[in-house]
C-alpha cells in the first residue's frame, strides 16, 4: 500500500515538469488558433495559424512575446521579398537561388534570429503560386501568421505560464547534494589505504560535476526567463539574483572540490602501500570535510528557501557549520604541520588541500554572499539605466511612491 502514494507523487512531479506542461499548453493553444483562423481568415485550411502558435507559445511569457514578434517579422519580410521578385522575374532555378540568398540576407538584417529560414520559406511559398495570386497568397500568409502569433500571446497572457524557480531550486539542491556526497566519500577514505584507481574514480566524479552545472544553468536560465514580464512575480529580480549568485558559488566550490580530489589522487600515487594520512590527521581532516559538506547543504537550502522562517533557519545552520568548519580546519592544519615537520614528504599537497578548503569556506561565507548580492543588484540597475534611462526613472518614482503610501 505505501507504494501507491509514492507512485501518485511521482506522477504529479512528472506532470509539473516543464516539458509536460508545455506539451499540454501548446496543444490547447494550437487548436484555439486554428478555430480563430477558420473564423477570421478566408483560407480553406488555415494550418499556418496553429503552426505559428506552436512555434510561438513557449514555456515563459517573455519567450512567447519575443518569439511571436520575430516570427511575424520573418513572415512579413519573406512576403515583401517575394512580392518584389514577382514584379521583376518569374520562378526559375536562378531566380530561386537569388530569392533564397536575398531572403536569408534580409532575415539576418531584420534580426529574426532562429526564424531566418522562415523568411526564405515564406518567400518561396508566395512566389510559387501564379503571378495573379501573389498578392492574395501573401496577404493570406501574413494574416494567418498574425492570427497564430496573437492567439499564442493571448493564451499565455490569459493562462500565465508557471514560474519555474521551483524546478531550478531543486536542480541547485541536487547539485549541492552531489557535492556533499563527494566530500563525504573523500573524507571516508583518508584513514585507510586508498588505491590509485579509487582515488582517480573520485577525481572523475568531481570532473563530472561540470556537466551537472551545465544542466543546472539551463534550468536556472529558464527560471530567470519565466520571471520576466510575469504578473505573478513581485520580486523577480531579487529571486533571479539570489539563485544566480548561489549557483556561481556552488560552481566555484565544485572547482575547489575537483582540485581537492586531484590532490588526494596525487597523494595516493605517492603513498601506495600506506594510508593517505596517519589516524589522528585523518580524523581531523574527516571532521573538517564533514562540516564543509554540511555547510554546502545549508547554503543550498538558504538560497532556495522561499519562506523567511526557513531561510533564517538555514542561515543559522550555515553560520554554525562554517564556524565548526573553521575550527576543524585550524585543528587539522596544526596536526598536518606537526606531521610534516617529522615526515616532510609531499608537504605541498597538504598545503594545497587546506587551501582549497579555505577557498570553499570563503565562498560560502554569509558576509561574502551578501556583498555579492548587493554588487549584482547594483550592476543590474546600472545596466538598466544605461539601456532604458527614462523607463528606469519612471519605475523608480513609482516604487518610491508605493513605499511612501505603505
Image (cartoon, rainbow, N blue to C red):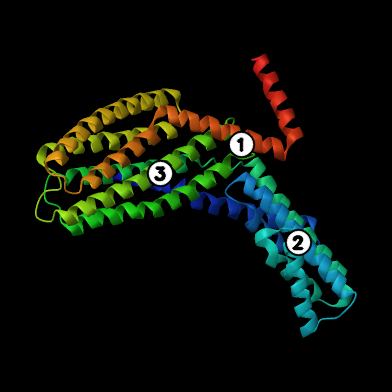
Q: In the current view of this chain or complex, which residue is farthest to the top?
A: 405
Q: Which residue is mark 1?
A: 380
Q: CA distance from mark 2 to mark 3?
A: 39 Å
At 61% from the left and 36% from the top, the residue drawn is: 380
Q: Which residue is mark 2?
A: 109
Q: Are marks 2 and 1 in contact (CB under 8 Å)?
A: no
User: Which percent across, then down, holds residue 400?
Assistant: 68, 20
User: Which percent across, then down, holds residue 201?
Assistant: 24, 57
Q: CA distance from mark 2 to mark 1?
A: 29 Å
Earlier residue among tags 2 and 1: 2
Q: For this rendering, which residue is in front, 206 or 332? A: 332
What label sits on residue 252 in the rendered view?
3
User: Which percent across, then down, holds residue 18?
Assistant: 50, 49
At 20% from the left and 43% from the top, the residue drawn is: 187
The answer to whether 339 is drawn above or below residue 126 in the figure is above
Q: For this rendering, which residue is in front, 57 or 178? A: 178
Q: For this rendering, which residue is in front, 209 or 159? A: 209
Answer whether residue 126 is visible to the viewer in this image.
yes
Q: Are marks 1 and 3 in contact (CB under 8 Å)?
A: no
Earlier residue among tags 1 and 3: 3
Neighbours of disc 3 within 10 Å: few (<14), some (14-19), many (20+): some
Q: Is residue 185 left or right of residue 30?
A: left
Answer whether residue 306 is visible to the viewer in this image.
no
Amino acid at each position: 500500500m505505501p507504494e501507491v502514494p509514492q507512485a501518485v507523487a511521482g506522477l504529479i512531479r512528472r506532470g509539473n515538469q516543464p516539458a509536460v506542461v508545455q506539451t499540454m499548453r501548446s496543444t490547447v493553444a494550437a487548436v484555439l488558433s486554428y478555430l480563430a483562423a477558420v473564423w477570421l481568415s478566408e483560407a480553406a485550411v488555415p494550418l499556418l495559424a496553429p503552426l505559428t502558435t506552436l512555434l510561438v507559445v513557449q514555456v515563459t511569457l517573455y519567450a512567447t512575446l519575443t518569439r511571436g514578434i520575430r516570427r511575424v517579422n520573418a513572415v512579413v519580410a519573406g512576403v515583401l521579398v517575394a512580392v518584389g521578385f514577382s514584379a521583376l522575374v518569374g520562378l526559375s532555378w536562378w531566380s530561386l537561388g537569388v530569392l533564397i540568398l536575398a531572403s536569408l540576407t534580409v532575415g539576418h538584417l531584420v534580426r529574426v534570429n532562429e526564424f531566418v529560414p522562415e523568411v526564405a520559406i515564406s518567400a518561396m511559398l508566395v512566389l510559387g503560386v501564379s503571378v495573379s495570386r501573389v498578392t492574395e497568397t501573401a496577404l493570406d500568409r501574413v494574416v494567418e501568421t498574425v492570427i497564430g502569433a496573437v492567439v499564442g500571446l493571448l493564451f499565455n497572457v490569459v493562462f500565465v505560464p508557471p514560474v519555474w524557480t521551483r524546478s531550478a531550486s531543486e536542480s541547485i539542491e541536487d547539485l549541492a547534494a552531489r557535492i556533499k556526497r563527494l566530500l563525504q566519500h573523500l573524507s571516508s577514505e583518508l584513514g585507510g589505504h586508498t588505491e590509485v584507481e579509487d582515488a582517480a574514480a573520485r577525481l572523475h566524479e568531481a570532473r563530472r560535476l561540470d556537466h551537472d552545472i551545465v544542466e543546472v544553468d539551463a534550468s536556472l536560465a529558464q527560471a530567470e526567463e519565466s520571471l520576466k514580464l510575469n504578473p505573478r512575480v513581485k520580486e523577480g529580480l531579487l529571486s533571479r539574483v539570489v539563485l544566480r549568485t548561489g549557483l556561481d558559488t556552488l560552481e566555484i566550490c565544485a572547482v575547489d572540490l575537483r582540485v581537492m580530489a586531484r590532490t588526494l589522487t596525487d597523494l595516493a600515487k605517492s603513498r601506495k602501500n600506506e594510508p593517505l594520512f596517519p589516524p589522528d590527521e585523518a580524523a581531523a581532516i574527516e571532521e573538517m570535510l564533514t562540516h564543509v559538506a554540511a555547510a554546502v547543504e545549508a547554503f543550498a537550502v538558504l538560497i532556495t528557501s522561499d519562506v523567511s522562517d526557513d531561510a533564517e533557519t538555514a542561515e543559522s545552520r550555515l553560520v554554525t557549520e562554517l564556524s565548526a568548519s573553521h575550527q576543524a580546519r585550524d585543528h587539522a592544519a596544526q596536526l598536518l604541520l606537526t606531521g610534516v615537520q617529522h615526515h616532510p614528504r609531499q608537504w605541498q599537497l597538504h598545503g594545497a588541500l587546506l587551501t582549497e578548503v579555505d577557498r570553499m569556506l570563503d565562498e560560502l561565507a554569509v558576509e561574502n554572499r551578501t556583498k555579492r548580492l548587493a554588487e549584482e543588484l547594483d550592476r543590474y540597475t546600472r545596466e538598466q539605466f544605461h539601456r532604458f534611462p527614462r523607463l528606469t526613472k519612471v519605475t523608480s518614482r513609482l516604487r518610491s511612491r508605493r513605499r511612501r503610501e505603505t
